[in-house]
Structures are given as C-alpha cells and as structure tokens.
Amino acid sequence: MLQELDESDYWLEILVLGGFTPETMLASLRGETQELIAIFVTVVVNTKKAERDSQEAFIPHISSLITRRNADGVRLLESPSALLQLKLNLVNEQ
C-alpha cells in the first residue's frame, strides 16, 4: 500500500511538472496522498518496534524454559527431547 501511495504521488507530480494539469488542481489530492504516506510510515515503524520489543521480552522467557539450574545453581541446557517438546508446544500455541 505504501509503495502504491508513493507511486501515485510521483505520477501526480509528473502531471504538474509536465504541464498537463495545474498544480492548484492537484494540490489537495497530493496533500492527502502525502498524509496517507506519513500515516502508513508511522504504522510500519510502530509495528516493527512492537515486534522487536515483543521478541526481546520473549527471549528471557524462552531461556527460562530451555534451561534449568543444578544443585549448585549453575544453569544447564535441557535435554534435546525437552527442547523438541518446547518447540512443539510453541508451534501448537500459534
């Protein structure tokens, strides 16, 4: 959608620069196109930030699931079968 908006703005600009249409005739349309571009850019940036924040919060949770502490408090990696079961549980949750 963002690419289409950018391309539309480009062609509107070409129409004006090529002398096919007066700038005043397309000013409001170009303004709305640029506002939509700004809105979609904001949505994309915020979505990527939220995904990154979500993944960062998820990593410690995974770490606690795939490791355990021994009697001395040393963190040990769980067995391969436990990791496989964790992966299957995660896939089933989606």
Image (tube, grey):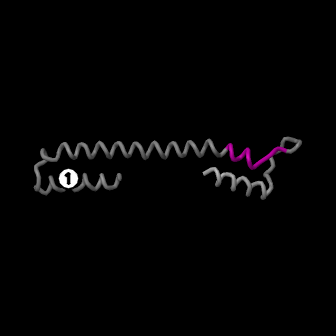
Report x, y in % for residue 35.
29, 42
Q: Is residue 50 left or right of residue 91?
A: left
Please give the range of residues in magenta. Answer: 60-69
Q: Nearer the viewer, residue 71 or 82?
A: 82
Residue 93, compared with residue 80, is above or below; it is: above
Q: Which residue is mark 1?
A: 13
For this orientation, the residue located farthest to the front is: 92
Instruction: Decide whether the magenta segment is chiefly helix, strand or loop.
Output: helix
Residue 56, compared with residue 21, is above or below; it is: above
Whether residue 40 appears in magenta in the rendering, the answer is no
Q: Is residue 12 left or right of residue 41?
A: left
Give the residue at x 35% y 52%: 2
Near mark 1 (Cα within 10 A), the count class, few <14, some 14-19 or many ≥20, is: some
Whether residue 64 appears in magenta in the rendering, the answer is yes
Report x, y in % for residue 1.
35, 53
For this orientation, the residue located farthest to the right is: 71
Give the residue at x 38% y 46%: 41
Report x, y in % for residue 3.
34, 55
Give the residue at x 46% y 42%: 46
Residue 64, compared with residue 86, is above or below; it is: above
**Mark 1, secondary structure of its residue:** helix
Disc 1 residue type (three-letter): Glu
Report x, y in % for residue 26.
16, 47
